[in-house]
Image (cartoon, rainbow, N blue to C red):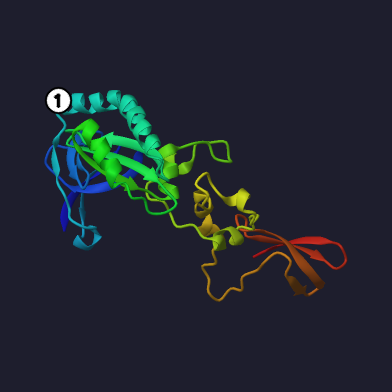
Amino acid sequence: MANVVGVSFRGNNKKYYFGSITNLNIGDKVVVDTIRGLEIGTITQGYKEIKEEEIIGELKNVVRKATQKDLDDYEANLRDKPELYNGLKEIIDKSNLEMKFLDCEYTLDRTKLLVYFSAEGRVDFRELVKEIASVYKTRIELRQVGPRDASRIIGGIGICGMEVCCKKFLGDIQNVTIKMAKNQNLSLNPTAISGLCGKLLCCISFEDFLYSKDNGDKKELSIGEKVKLENGEGVIVNIDNDSRTVTIKMDTGEEIELSQ
C-alpha cells in the first residue's frame, strides 16, 4: 500500500496521485515534481492508501507545501503568459509548419518551456525548437496533442449552449462509441452528435448506463421492431429508458405504453 494525496492543476480537472508529506489539507497549494518539471498544484484529495497496482508509472512525491516565493513565481508566470503566447505565435506562424499552436507554459522555476500544438500528421519541428530556444534561453519541449485534448485546452461553447464539459469539469476523458448513441436513439448525423473537437460528444457517455442492458437474458428492443401481444400486433415507436417504458403503435392505430 502507498499513502498518497490527490493533486489537480490549473486548467485541468484530472486528479493525480503523489506520495504525501505531513500536514497537508484539501485546498493547500503544493510544489510537485512531474514529468514536465516542477509545478504548483492544489490538494483535491486528502490522505488515502492505494494499492501498488493502482499506481501508473513512478509515484513521485510532493516536494513541499508552496512557499510565498513559489506562489510569487507562479503568479509571475501567469502575468507573463500573454506576452509569451504572442511571441511564440509569431515565431510559429513565420515557420510555415503545418501545425496549430494551442498553448504554452513555463515550469515553476522556468527551467523548461512547454509548447502545445495540434497537427494532422507528424511535424519536423527541430529547427523551430532551436529558434524558440535562442529567443527564450531555456529548454524547449513541443507536445503534440489529439483533438479531444486540444478542445480541452482551447475551451468553447458546446451545442448545448454551455462551456464544453472537457474544459469545465471532466477529469479523465471517457471513451465514447457510436453504439452509445444508438442505444439512446440519438440522431446519427455527425453534426448533431459531434463536439467542437470533431469527435463524439463526451456527454453521450454520461447516461449510457441507463440505456445499456444489464440483464444478459433480456432481449434488446429497438424502435421500428414489430412485436406480437395478446391483443394483436404492433410496432415499437418509442423507448424511454429513464422510465423503463415502451410505446407500441398497434395495427388498429391505438398506442399503448408498457413497462420494459
Question: Relative to 176, is 229 above or below?
Answer: below
From the viewer's side, name the closer residue of 137 and 5.
Answer: 137
- Which quadrant of the structure image shows residue 78? top left
Report the quarter where the C terminus lies.
Answer: bottom right
Residue visible at 20% across and 34% down in the picture:
108
- Secondary structure beneath dot 1 equals helix
Q: Residue 106: where, in percent of width, then height? A: 24, 34
Which residue position holds label 1? 69
Query: Residue 77 vs residue 247: left or right?
Result: left
Question: Relative to 16, is 56 above or below?
Answer: below
Q: Is residue 28 visible?
A: no
From the viewer's side, name the closer residue of 257 and 111.
Answer: 111
Report crowding for label 1: few under 14, some 14 to 19, many 20 or more residues within 10 A (C-alpha). few
Residue visible at 58% across and 40% down in the picture:
160
Query: Residue 199 vs residue 229: left or right?
Result: left
Q: Residue 79: where, in percent of width, then height? A: 29, 23
